[in-house]
Amino acid sequence: MVYYGSDAAGGWQRLDRPLRTITTIDRFAIVAPNGRGHTMRMLQPLELAAAMGFPPDYKWPQSTRREKVKLVGNAVCPPVMKAVIESLIAES
């Protein structure tokens, strides 16, 4: 679910759809049923990074969770940047 903001979907997003734009603040949460209702937890920095296409072995600087979320939110998706660079190399 989108924790901050509003849209026509009421903040809900299906898991089989691409994640929306990742920002520099905690915005996405996983909601799961439990025996008494539902639990919600914010996506962790490594989960956000995986959604953007960062490899699992990417080395993050020593920083706080908040700083890592900000780094991911300010990043360009690695697969997109790779495609841009490959197209530039192919043209030269």
Image (cartoon, helix red, strand yellow):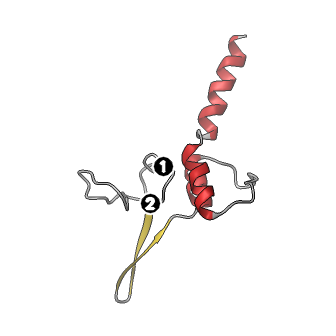
Toward the top, the furthest residue is: 92
Q: Secondary structure at mark 2?
A: loop
Residue 8 left/right relative to 15: left
Of the residues shown, which amino acid type is indicated by label 2? Answer: Phe
Residue name at image x 57 percent, y 47 percent: 52
**Few, some or many residues within 10 Å of mark 1 (<14, 14–19, 20+):** some
Q: CA distance from mark 1 to mark 2?
A: 9 Å
Q: Nearer the viewer, mark 1 or mark 2?
A: 1
Image quarter of the N terminus? bottom left
Toward the bottom, the furthest residue is: 36
Image quarter of the C terminus? top right
Q: Which residue is at the front of the view, 77 or 34?
A: 77
Q: Which mark is residue 47?
A: none
Of the residues shown, which amino acid type is indicated by label 1? Answer: Thr
**Few, some or many residues within 10 Å of mark 2 (<14, 14–19, 20+):** many
**Residue 1 appears in view:** no
Residue 35 left/right relative to 52: left
What is the x, y in percent for residue 80?
59, 34
**Residue 70 appears in view:** yes
Q: Which mark is residue 28?
A: 2
Q: Secondary structure at mark 1?
A: loop
* Quarter of image, res 60: bottom right
Q: Earlier in the sequence, mark 1 or mark 2?
A: 1
Is 26 situated above or below 84? below
Residue 18 left/right relative to 55: left
Q: Which mark is residue 23?
A: 1
What is the x, y in percent for residue 29?
44, 65
Q: Which residue is at the front of the view, 57 or 64?
A: 64
| Image label count | 2
Q: Which residue is at the front of the view, 67 or 3?
A: 67
What is the x, y in percent for residue 89?
72, 18
Residue name at image x 38 percent, y 89 percent: 35
